Amino acid sequence: MENIEIKILEFLKGLGTILLYFVTTIIASSLLANFYYHNNIVVATIAQILAYVLLLLVLGIVYRKRLTQDFKDFKKEYIKVALKNWIIGLGVMFICNIIVSSFSGDIATNEEANRNLIALYPVSSAITMIFVGPLVEEITFRASFKKVFSKWYTFAIVTSLIFGAAHISNFFVLLSQGTFNLQELLYLIPYSTLGFFFAKAFYETDNIYTSYLAHMFHNGMCVTLLLLLSLVG
């Protein structure tokens, strides 16, 4: 009974972390609203980076012990674990994206928004999407739930679904407005698939920096490709 109560408390802590993530994001964006999309690209770049840094600081304070200990315990072998899970996750996600795109005929709203940001603000996008964002998301969607599940696959499935849902937030916005968009909901599949392998990498090593590296590999590849395409275009 005591073990169940601990798991419930840890689960509530995980939900609280997600709430903290969104609340802090809203507050940071509001505080920097006048500068976030400023006509001066330098001002906009600094504001966008600062918003993510503030978010990381808040979450970093809450999970400072975990982050510090995992940093000390990190081994070079974990890089291979991160790379292996990312490559497998990338392959499965690619297949899922092809299938989903055949139904929707378009890309996910989240993907479209990221492409626009990269085109308009390449520097801040590269820094936030490759380095800061992945750590923020791994803390929020992975580390916060680590103690809740005793089985790795349960942990991977639940956290990947939460991770995927966060990346199709536009679906829930439309739903709140009384509009149901099944096509947008379908993108839960590829996002969750990738999140599953990030979670697996984390669970295999019990180190948040393993999943962070896998996440960083993926975002780094995507941002680099989009930057190259924007230059060619």
Image (cartoon, helix red, strand yellow):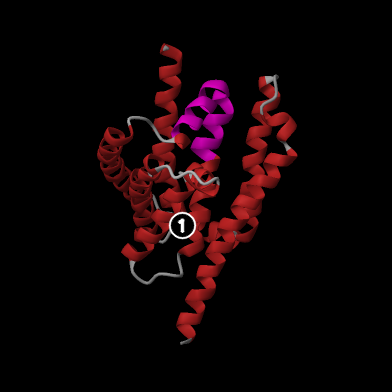
Quadrant for the C terminus in the image: top left
**Above or below, comparing residue 219 to residue 228 in the picture:** below
The quadrant in which residue 107 appears is top left
Is 115 positioned to the left or the right of 157 in the image? right
Query: What segment carries the magenta color?
Result: 111-131
Magenta stretch encompasses residue 112: yes
**Above or below, comparing residue 204 to residue 54 in the picture:** below
Magenta stretch encompasses residue 154: no
The quadrant in which residue 122 appears is top right
Q: Position of residue 194 (x, y in %)?
A: 35, 46
Q: Residue furthest top?
A: 233
Is 46 positioned to the left or the right of 69 in the image? right
Please tell me which residue is depicted at 66% across the width and 21% down the height of the picture.
Answer: 41
Pick the front one: 166 or 228: 166
What is the chief secondary structure element of the magenta stretch? helix
Q: Is residue 77 visible?
A: no
Q: Position of residue 32 (x, y in %)?
A: 72, 36
Q: Position of residue 95 (x, y in %)?
A: 25, 39
Q: Is residue 231 visible?
A: yes
Q: Residues within 10 Å of mark 1 (few under 14, many from 20)?
A: many
Please tell me which residue is depicted at 58% across the width and 29% down the height of the picture.
Answer: 124
Q: Secondary structure at mark 1?
A: loop
Residue bearing the label numbered 1: 142
**Above or below, comparing residue 31 to residue 38 in the picture:** below
**Label total for image:** 1
Please tell me which residue is depicted at 48% across the width and 51% down the height of the picture.
Answer: 138
Question: Which residue type does callout 1 highlight?
Answer: Arg
Q: Position of residue 209 (x, y in %)?
A: 46, 51
